[in-house]
Image: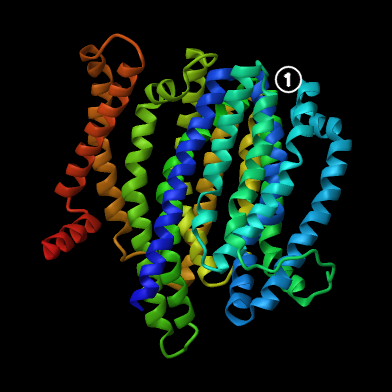
Amino acid sequence: MTEGRRGLAKAATLIALGNIASRALGLLRDTVIAGLFGASAGVSAFRTAEFVPRQFYDLLVGGMISSALVPVFSEYAEKDRRVLWQVASLILSLTVIVLGVVILLAELVAPQIAWLLGGSKLDLLLLTRLLRITTPAMLFLSLSGIITGLLYALKRFVFPAFTAAIFNASIVTVTLVGAWKFGRGIEVVALGLIVGSAAQVALQLPGLRGARLRFAFDFKHPVLRRIGRLYQPVILGLAVTLFQTSLDRRLANTTGESSLAWMQNATTLIQFPMGLVSVAISLAILPTLSRYAAQSLNLDDAAKADARFMDTLFSGLKVVLILIIPSTVALFILAEPIIALLFEHGAFTPFDTQQTALALRFYLLGLTFAAIDQPLIFAFYARQNTFTPAMVGIASVGIYLAAALSPMLFRSLEMTDLVLADSIKHLGHVTIMLWLIQRWGPLRGHGLGATTLKSVLAAGVMALILWRGKMWLPLLLPPSGLLSEVLLVGGLIVIGGGVYLAGIALLKVEEVELIKKRMKRKG
């Protein structure tokens, strides 16, 4: 048991390090793109072009990794490695054949895809050219994802943990070399996407030592049908999400040539707390939730197991709230200085900073809902129920469409309408999910309301300090320059974090008290 826990801790640490490296390099990637190309129509065209391979990957492979591939691969890795190599060979071969055909067709109809996604305010010739560069990336992304699932099943975590990091690092490198050395335009970023996706595959090849993979044609193998059954609910939800995302991008392009670039930069900032708080905590509680879900199948232990399941879930939700509420407040108040520090260089103008901050603040209205939604989704996965989250996802897309399109009855659509609709979608999704989990036990009695209230109070005091500090601290710093921006943002984050931690300690937030008791025991 000790060795198992050590292995799990090691794997979790590797994945966490890879996640941090990926997000840091992803931020550097967007900073480089903003500095070289600003929030121009070219950047919006690239964001639209990269959408195609990314969404095909998410639809065909991305969602399949956790819901179907890893469970199936893990089973065969434990029982029979020979069958594992056969199954992996089949899936890889099928992926190459299917995506080869898809890529060929996409290259032929690239102008039509550009028209469908681009709207009236993008350069369709540029978008067509970028689509033809980026589309082959879907093959490399998909192969990389399948190999990742295979390596996870083999408990080889080192190489897949850093695939996203090498992807972002490749884009940064190719973009800088192409733009500065050869004076190329936005096409170099698209080329970086191809290089990055291929680098993901290359990085993981050493992890396949001992694997007996070959090109296989037995596409009637029963394991393919099994994977398909597991993945059906997930792919249905992803297909609807793909429709919503495609429509969102097309509508964004109708609101202005730079809208999509502003929205993407704001999304980059949102992804930091989502990835480092919500996703991380969801993954941490998933094994425990799964164990209690399995125990609840035993009628003698069902009530006790369900109670423990709910306690674990709400403990995770409380930790998410303690961390996500101050993150939301800090990003809301410090939007302009943070965006200026990260993006306002080169072609990225102060006006771009203001518009990105506007989009960010509307996204932040839904951040808390999106953050607590993730553990709820994982709770259903722990009970081997992928159907319910998929159906709720479809319903939330309907909420988004109603919120996004209703302003068009009275006036022309604006960027903020789309971002606000996204936040309303998250509110609707989490409301439905909370209503549904009541079947497992009552929502009251877990201290969620008290934790939320105390976190909001502490964050309110922090907000006041940050607001005043944003006005007074610049008077003590050099008038301009990168150093001044770093000191301003860094200083305010340190001050705000200290105020918030003191606040939740004084208010005796339950989770903080538990940490203090454990530290006293160790001392």
Residue 252 is at least partly visible in this image: no
Residue 340 is at least partly visible in this image: yes
Q: Is residue 363 above or below residue 206?
A: above
Q: Quadrant of the C terminus?
A: bottom left
Q: Is residue 444 left or right of residue 382?
A: left
Residue 512 lies, in percent from the top left, at: 21, 55
Residue 331 lies, in percent from the top left, at: 38, 32
Choose top left, top right, bottom left or bottom right for residue 244: top right
Q: Is residue 314 left or right of residue 82?
A: left
In the structure shown, which secondary structural element does the residue marked by tag 1 occupy? loop
Q: Quadrant of the N terminus?
A: bottom left
Residue located at (34% from left, 19% from top): 485
Q: Amino acid at mark 1?
A: Lys
Q: Nearer the viewer, residue 368 or 2?
A: 2
Q: Is residue 98 above or below residue 343?
A: below
Q: Is residue 45 left or right of residue 161?
A: right
Q: Nearer the viewer, residue 136 or 521?
A: 136
Residue 453 lies, in percent from the top left, at: 28, 48
